[in-house]
Image: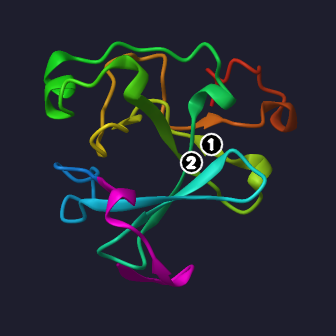
């Protein structure tokens, strides 16, 4: 399948590379199909919409920057993702970059949970008040602690 993107031009992807968000991503409910594209020599990826070539997000595994990040998923989310085995779950967080990558932040309050066994995913809004939408990824630049709990 060929998709047309603003950032990458025409891309050929396989059906098994499409990640389905049955409920969409909050703010973008009409776009439900995405593909994940690695950003060379970094832990970051582009989550590129298959349906809208102008829509992509930078995402990262939170454990690269926040090794103590943890939360519990509600049973309705697990059900929506097809009752995945733990080893088939992958967690990604949307990254915001304004200007310099050294000032990038991750949204730990709303992780993307991806069941790699069936390629279904959902962005989940956590009820944990210690996780915010803007956790600094490179705190040494701003003087914040590595724990990333400050914004």
Judge whether 123 appears above or below 31 on screen.
above
How did the renderer colour the structure?
rainbow
**Residue sitting at x 48%, y 16%:** 130
From this view, report whether residue 18 is shown above or below residue 114.
Answer: below
Q: Which residue is mark 1?
A: 105
**Residue 24 percent across, percent down from the top left:** 23, 53
Quadrant of the image occupied by residue 63: top right
Q: Secondary structure at mark 2?
A: strand
Residue closer to the observer: 82 or 99: 82
> CB of mark 2 within 8 Å of CB of mark 1?
yes
Would residue 30 appear left or right of 92 to someone viewing this image? left
Q: Give residue 77's quadrant in the image.
A: top left
Q: Residue at x 39, y 81 (%)?
A: 3
Q: Is residue 14 above or below residue 116?
A: below
Whichever of callouts 2 and 1 sits on the residue coming sooner in the sequence is 2
Q: Percent from the top left, x then y, of residue 78?
A: 21, 24
Q: Which residues are magenta?
A: 1-19
Q: Which mark is residue 35?
A: none
**Residue located 77% across and 37% down the image:** 138
In the figure, residue 17 lies in which quadrant?
Answer: bottom left
Residue 95's label in the rendered image is: 2
């Amino acid at each position: 399948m060929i998709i047309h993107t603003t950032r990458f031009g025409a891309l050929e992807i396989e059906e098994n590379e499409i990640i389905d968000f049955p409920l969409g991503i909050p703010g973008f409910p009409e776009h439900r199909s995405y593909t994940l594209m690695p950003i060379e020599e970094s832990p970051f990826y582009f989550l590129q919409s298959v349906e809208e070539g102008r829509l992509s997000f930078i995402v990262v595994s939170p454990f690269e920057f926040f090794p103590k990040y943890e939360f519990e998923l509600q049973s309705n989310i697990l059900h929506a993702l097809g009752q995945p085995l733990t080893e088939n779950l992958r967690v990604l967080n949307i990254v915001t970059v304004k200007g310099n990558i050294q000032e990038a932040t991750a949204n730990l309050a709303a992780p993307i949970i991806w069941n790699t066994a069936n390629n279904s995913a959902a962005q989940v809004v956590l009820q944990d008040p210690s996780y915010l939408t803007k956790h600094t990824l490179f705190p040494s630049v701003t003087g914040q602690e590595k724990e990333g709990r400050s914004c």
